[in-house]
Amino acid sequence: MTKLIILTAILSLFLGCKKTSPVIPVSKNNVKDTIQHSPRCTLKEAENKILKLDEVIASSHFIDSLSNHKQGIALISDSTSIDKIPYYSIQAGYNSELRFENYYLFYVEKGNCDHIKILEPASGNIINIEDWRKAQNGNLSYDF
């Protein structure tokens, strides 16, 4: 009976603890405020955003037909920063038995999943996906 009471007390302590995000002081115009620091865009959300892009969907259909309907597009994710802003770095491509064949390299801002950049391979510049699409000017061919 004593073991049950001790076990119940320990369990109550663990359940009573509430995990909170750290509070980070922010100084703005010499006025200190506090904000809750938590990512507004998780890796899973960022990957789902990438999987819904027209370019990625078209590439996935190509890989599906290439692999006799056994594979789709593969993603390799990492973290990086661009101009001191944290991003998820997400490669989208074909993962064959021999190697990973990269088709696109996307960057999704950790603070905003709607802010997506892409590596423009010819120049090596990282630009907003909207600007990249405009630069393509309809030159994208999804018929692999």
Image (tube, rainbow, N blue to C red):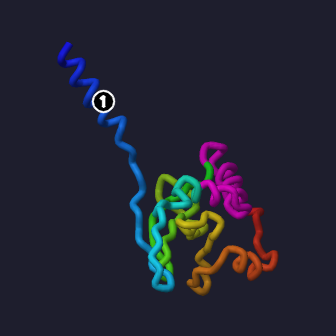
Q: Which residue lies at the image location 45% right of the left edge and 76% below the top edge? A: 32
Task: Where is residue 65? Give x, y as percent.
Answer: 69, 50
Q: Residue furthest right?
A: 138
- Pointer 1 residue: 11
> How far across and down, in percent of the image, does residue 42 sit?
53, 57
Q: Quadrant of residue 127?
A: bottom right
Spot the residue most to the left. 2
* Horizontal side, residue 89 vs residue 61: left or right: left
Tell me what residue is drawn at x 45 percent, y 67 percent: 79
Residue drawn at (36%, 37%) of the image:
16
Q: Say above or below: 10 vs 41.
A: above
- Residue at the spot x=58%, y=84% of the render? 125
Q: Quadrant of residue 14?
A: top left
Which residue of the protein is positioned furthest toward the front in this rendering? Answer: 31
Residue 67 lies in the magenta stretch: yes
Task: Please state if 8 lies on the left or on the right of 73 as rendered.
Answer: left
Amino acid type, residue under disc 1 in the picture: Leu
The stretch of residues the image draws in magenta is 48-71
Query: Element at badge 1?
Result: helix
Q: Nearer the viewer, residue 73 or 115?
A: 115
The magenta stretch spans residue 65: yes
Front-most of residues 121 and 49: 49
